[in-house]
Amino acid sequence: MSEPLPLSVIVLTLNEERHLPGCLASVAGLARQILVVDSGSHDRTVELARAAGAEVVHRAFTGFASQRNAALELARQPWVLFLDADERVTPELAAEIRQAIDQATDEVAGFWIPTQNWMFGRWIRGGGWWPDEHLRLLRAGRARYRPEVEVHEVVELAGEAGRLAYPLVHINYESYREFLAKQARYARIRAETLVRQGRRPRRRTYLGQPARELWRRFVTLRGYRDGPVGLFLALAMAWHELHTWLLARRLWRASGLANDHGTPAGVELPDASLDLSVVIVSYNVREHLLACLETVDAGLRAGGLRGEVIVVDNASSDGTAEAVRAAFPGVELIANRENRGFAAANNQGIRRARGRVVVLLNPDTRVARDALGRLVRFLDENPAVGVVGPRLVYPDGRTQLSRRRFPTLLTGFLESTVVQDYWHDNRVLRRYYVADRSDDETQEVDWLVGACLAVRREAIETAGLLDERFFLYSEEVEWCWRIRRAGWRVVYLPEATVYHHESASAGQEPASRQIAFDTAKVQLYERLHGRPAAEILRAFLLLNYLARIAIEGAKWLLGHKRALRRERIARYWQAFGSGLRATRP
């Protein structure tokens, strides 16, 4: 008999005396730790778990995701396998798990496992119930569940994920009544999540969402393969959608929830009648914008997309609005009388958008021939993805650093400061710039540089518009942070390419750019890490300007490029004098 693996098998339970013995028997001898986290069972669950040799920990139920995260902290082995009490590990899957753990490289942090769902005494093959993959085999310390997603929990991995071939056997439901009761419970949990996310039902939601779910389950996912049972399941899931939104409406009315803390709430956009809406915000970059529009027009044709282009001009003084009207009469132009800022102007365009995908595009970009088509197709093929961005490249073909992780507390004190000038190769910034991953592979990231972002309409409706308190810079970081908190994924797609000249608008006014960049950084830190962290960062950045003034002054005294040193000293002094307070220029 093989030795137990360096593995913790974890089972969450509540009154599971009927299923738990079979579950624990299927993993006997497989793992060094068998852990049952019980939420207050009043049947024989705990007694049966201990009889099978499992450790038992009692923890009041606080949500599926939080229960799993708490259980991860109790694992004593380097690998964790999560099971439900009504799931079974077959001998074939056990052997594959053993092989996967033995051969896993350091880059691998988890494995997807397919699920063979048995309902009403039969294996269900259609309707999305097969292969029904889940991330269940996880490397301890490099996985966590998103606490805001309580139904069908979402795992975040610090590393790559592999896939196993043999399935878990899930003895799902034995009666139709049991199935409907469980879906009613899930509907209540999901409705509460929707309200927390700020998602309100619209009139068409009550008909459209159930109808789409019925079609998706029975036709698109071929539920018809399971005959009358497949039809029942499709109808039941359609009812689940309607029930969820009715409960959400009841919760909204009962609680009177309102967004009173400045965070953009969910938004209702015009009906989607096009494949794609491209929104471009411009400010004194006429020639760049005209060249960009040429490539967008070609890209829409190459991708076979029904699309529209919306240009929002922020009071340019170089004749941008007139040039767009003359050269591109089919473009919808919004000409602002004042510079409203990048986020606010993008929101103007988004509110007009009729595409099921909205692409935010900088005017100093050039879209490669099929880039737009690739981005839209990727979103169509990956319904859990809310945002996808292309590979950004400089005009000479070099890849730009466009992938990021969210900044930690330390990141702000290193990135684009005098510290980075003299210590650029450090662990904090390598993590921030995702230096541990190749820019040639498709990958999930925290956020992407906003020069080109393709955003699913539903993600915008869920998370809301860009936060207009960000005048310039960091708005895409906060937006991606909010979109991910709403349960959507953000993905980098290198097979789509967009050429980016970088900072064409902001680069015209170096002092204003410096002030805007660091002011936005302080605002972002207040959003992500709280006001005390933001105020400490503000003070540090102001001291950073004084340090830079001293360095530039020393170089001026040495006679090195004195004109350049005077210009930089003036820029840093102006930035210091601003106090990095969020006011519009």
Image: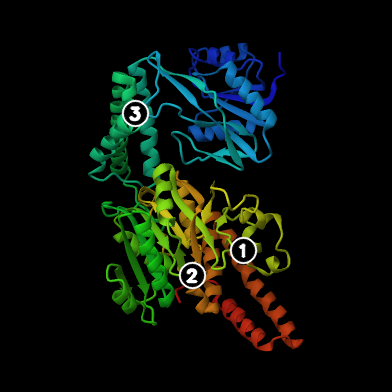
N-term mark: 1 or 2: 1
Q: Which residue is mark 1?
A: 536
Tell me which corner region of the image, top left, top right, bottom left or bottom right, holds residue 334. Answer: bottom left
The amino acid type of the residue labelled 3 equals Arg
Foreground mark, 2 or 3, reads 3
Extreme residue in the right direction: 558
Secondary structure state at the residue bearing disc 3: loop
At label 3, counting other C-alpha atoms closer than 10 Å, the crowd grade (few under 14, some 14-19, many 20 or more) is some
Tell me which corner region of the image, top left, top right, bottom left or bottom right, holds residue 422. Answer: bottom right
Q: Describe residue 242's horizontal placement relative to residue 514 as left or right.
A: left
Q: Position of residue 134 (x, y in %)?
A: 50, 31
Look at the image and name its color scheme: rainbow
Image height of 173 relative to 545, above or below: above
The amino acid type of the residue labelled 1 equals Ile
Image height of 294 relative to 320, above or below: above
Q: Position of residue 81 (x, y in %)?
A: 59, 27
Q: Which residue is mark 3?
A: 222
Depth check: give the residue in front, 579 or 420: 420
Which residue shows up at 68% across the image and 37% down it? 105
Label 1 and label 2: CA atoms lie apart by 16 Å
Q: Which residue is mark 2?
A: 582
Label 1 and label 3: CA atoms lie apart by 56 Å
Which residue shows up at 42% across the image and 55% down it? 454
Q: Position of residue 93 (x, y in %)?
A: 58, 21
Residue 576 - label: none
Secondary structure state at the residue bearing disc 1: helix
